[in-house]
Every structure is written in structure tokens, then in C-alpha cells.
Image (cartoon, grey):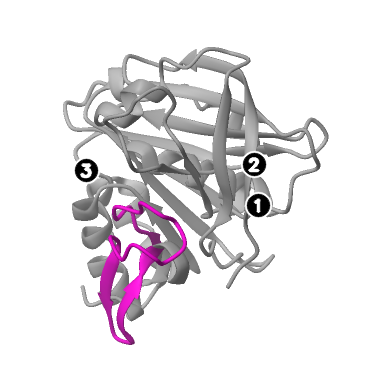
Amino acid sequence: MNYKEVRNLVVTENSALNATNFLIKLRSAEPLPLLKPGQFVNIEINDASEIFLRRPFSVFEVDYLQNTISIIVKILGRGSKKLTEIKTEAILSVIFPLGKGFTFPDKSDNVLLIGGGSGVAPMLFLAKESGLERDKVNILIGAKSVEDHINVSDYNAFGNLFFTTEDGSLGEKGFVTQHSVFINTLKKYDKIYACGPDAMMKAIAKIAKEANVFCEVSLENLMACGFGVCLCCIEPTVKGNLCVCTEGPVFNINDLKW
């Protein structure tokens, strides 16, 4: 079992990225352990007696000098909505680091990182931490419209940014699997990584598998406890039914029964 701990972290920032996405930064009083792209934290929701379960969030950014962890919270229900209302200096109980992260690319690899919805956070973290030259990294981000996208221009330093929207208001119109950087250059990628809605990841996995391209996806199953006790996040795999929170959330698509 991976090392993990419970800490009380201080909220140092809570800022709106758009109407439904918020950046929350948390500071630890003690040095942070190593956190890998694809791993997540489980947060207890304060002052909400009707919300019993912790909520999982992918790690977005880590600053080891300032001992801060940043997450992107997308409002999807009562728990996430309550968290976006948190005030700075508030204390949150956080379990971390949880789960297994992505397989890091080799230095010679060309990679495609695909994020949708709350799946943008681990993709940007991976782009930053990969250590690859910028021209070897393509980052493809999908959303319904321009209003749903967040400003990720800072990540131009770590890869080439591409966008899709279902209404065509930003980037190419359609889904990520219809974008030219995906369908026209699929064979050039040594590795594809994805996180987002199930339908998006399954569509990516199907195409990548047919093209025999290495692909890992980060699943977003309900993960209440975060360490394999509650069995809420079971996923059928070729190795049997596995807990996403401990055996994942990152899986090679060849191990999934998709």
C-alpha cells in the first residue's frame, strides 16, 4: 500500500477560473511528500453535515518550496459547490497522496495529453512534470463552449495547446477525437494520456487500441474513502474487479474491459 497521511491544510487561495471552475490552493505546515501526475487528494467538506463522504480531486500543481498543493474544483454537485465557497485561512482535512500516477514518458517520446472537464488538471500537471521538450508535447483540451474552458496559457511553456468546443466557439468544432491533432497525426505519438468523462476516454481508448498506440487513462469513478475500504470505485479489468483508488486511478487501456 502506498504511503499516505491525513493533514489539516490551510486554504491560501480560492479563485474563480470561470462560472463553474475554481482554483483552490492549500498550504501544508510541513514539507510535502512527492506527488505524481495522476495522483489525487481526498478532501473532507467542512460545515456540511449532510455530506458524509470526502471528495477526490486530481492534483493540479505542487510547489515544494511553498508547501502548497493546487486543485481545480468543477461544480458537479453539493460537495464540490460547498468547497468552492470555502474562505481563505479555512482549514481542510486532506488525505494524500492517493492512487497511482501516470507512466512517465521517455525523453525521446512524442506525447499527446487529452483533458476534458475536471480532467484538465492532471494533464497540465503531467505536461509540466514530464521533462520533455515543448515540441514533443501536444495538449488537447475539450469543452462544450468557450465559457467552459479555463485560461491555460501559462502551459504554452510545456507543450503546444489545442482546443475543441462542441459549438465551435474556441478551437476546432467537435469532440477531442475529431480534432486534427488527434486524427491526422495519431501514428506519430509514442504515448497518449487522457482524463475526462467516461465517453471521451472510451472513444480515445478505442482509437488508440486500434492504432496500437500506448495509452493510459485516469478514471473518475466515485472514490469515497480513497484507499480501498469502501469499494465504491470498483472497475472491471482483465485482472478482475479492482479498486480505482488504489490500483489506479491511472490504467493502461489494455487492462480495462472497454
Q: Which residues are magenta?
A: 217-244
Say what secondary structure mark 1 lies in: loop
Q: Earlier in the sequence, mark 1 or mark 3?
A: 1
Using the image, determine if residue 256 lies above or below residue 177: below
Q: Earlier in the sequence, mark 2 or mark 3?
A: 2
From the viewer's perspective, is the residue at label 1 or at label 2 nearer?
2
Q: Which residue is mark 1?
A: 35
From the viewer's perspective, is the residue at label 2 or at label 3 nearer?
2
Q: Amino acid at mark 2?
A: Arg
Using the image, determine if residue 41 lies above or below residue 172: below
Q: CA distance from mark 1 to mark 3?
A: 30 Å
> What is the quadrant of the C terminus in the image?
bottom left
> Magenta span has 125?
no
Q: Amino acid at mark 3?
A: Phe
> Magenta span has 232?
yes
Q: Residue 196 location in percent, x, y?
A: 32, 47
> In the image, what residue occupies the spot 53% across and 41% down?
124
> In the image, what residue occupies the spot 76% across and 35% down?
67
> In the image, what residue occupies the spot 36% across and 34% down?
163
Say what secondary structure mark 2 lies in: strand
Residue 226 falls left or right of residue 59: left
**Can residue 43 be spotted in the picture?**
yes
As drawn, the label of residue 7 is 2
